[in-house]
Image (spheres, rainbow, N blue to C red):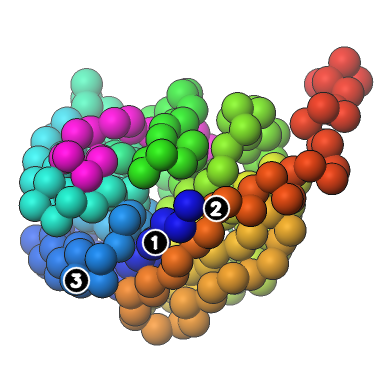
Amino acid sequence: MTLRIALAQIPVEHGKPEENYKKVAQYLSKAAQAKADVVVLPELWNTGYDLARLEEIADVEGQRTKEFIQAKAQEYKIDIVGGSVAIKENEQFYNTTYIVDKQGKLISEYRKVHLFRLMDEDKYLAAGEQKNVFELSGVKSASFICYDIRFPEWLRTVAKEKLSIIYVVAQWPQTRIEQWKALLVARAIENQAYVVAVNRVGDNPDNKFNGHSLIINPLGEVLSDSGDQETLTVYDLDTSEMEKFTQQIHVFEDRRPELYD
Ligand SMILES: O=C(O)CCC(=O)C(=O)O
């Protein structure tokens, strides 16, 4: 089947949720005009990395974000992989993804499992402990957040459920963009799944971000690279070829878990 995927490669205004909700609303509307089945947003798009002000600007229990994307999904009949937002829950802050289907139903959520010390996430955020496997437009998928992709063991743990698409949402700095590409290509090949990865553009007080949102097939071929500017990329992904990729090399069957830690 063919899935029309829209990748919202947008800038995020540091510590300014109002502006960011407006920007995301514009891009959801653009994705709907392009008749996308699914739209993917970047990481921490409500607050950016203004983590020291989370008490003031985090979304309490994700209420605002959930209501906002559920209403848009229903209005536009579009699935939303909601990037991630900073939320406050039980006196803690989390970097959280919400997945909403075309009926506006919240079908799953995910809290970033690996906190990134270089950006002080360990000081301000609590880590998640659950995987996020879901079906969108009939395609079995999972999602991860940014630094998570440096942990192949985590993606493998989830990918053992035989995924077709691995979604990744990120704020990955320009200085390490080659690592972003290499890690995503490797995760696609080793897990025999498509990777759909959205990174932001623009800058914040500490980093520059140059996008390069990617769609990669299970052979590790880059099908789409969004370049380094703000853009909505729309790509028709034909997932019917999955079996062609998985029938030759049986990595899941050939694992020797008894030898691994
Ligand atoms: O691992 C990296 O180099 C970047 C990770 C990152 O920026 C994040 O997790 O927010």
Instruction: Provide the secondary structure element on which disc 2 rests.
Output: helix
Residue 184 in the image: x percent, y percent? 63, 57
Q: Which amino acid does label 3 sit on?
A: Gln
- Which sits in the foreground, 118 or 68? 68
The residue carrying pointer 3 sits among few (fewer than 14), some (14 to 19) or many (20 or more) residues within 10 Å by Cα, namely few
* Residue under label 3: 33
* Residue at screen point 74% across, 58% down: 219
* Residue at screen point 15% across, 67% down: 29
* Residue under label 2: 239
| Ligand 1 lies under 8 Å from the Cβ of mark 3 | no
Residue 5 is labelled as: 1
* Residue at screen point 53% across, 59% down: 238
The residue carrying pointer 1 sits among few (fewer than 14), some (14 to 19) or many (20 or more) residues within 10 Å by Cα, namely many
Which numbered disc flags the more N-terminal residue, 1 or 2?
1
Give the CA separation, mark 3 to mark 1. 12 Å
Residue 261 in the image: x percent, y percent? 81, 21
**Residue 232 vertical position relative to residue 193 in the rendered view, above or below:** below
* Residue at screen point 49% across, 37% down: 140
Give the magenta part as a residue range. Answer: 100-114
| Ligand 1 lies under 8 Å from the Cβ of mark 2 | no
Give the CA separation, mark 2 to mark 3. 23 Å
Residue 207 in the image: x percent, y percent? 44, 71
Instruction: Provide the secondary structure element on which disc 3 rests.
Output: helix
Which numbered disc flags the more N-terminal residue, 3 or 1?
1
Asked if the magenta segment contains residue 184, the reply would be no
| Ligand 1 lies under 8 Å from the Cβ of mark 1 | no
Instruction: Provide the secondary structure element on which disc 1 rests.
Output: strand
- Which sits in the foreground, 186 or 19? 186
Disc 1 versus disc 2: nearer the observer: 2
**Residue 211 vertical position relative to residue 154 in the rendered view, above or below:** below
Proximity of marks 1 and 2: CB atoms separated by less than 8 Å: no
**Residue 76 vertical position relative to residue 58 in the rendered view, above or below:** below
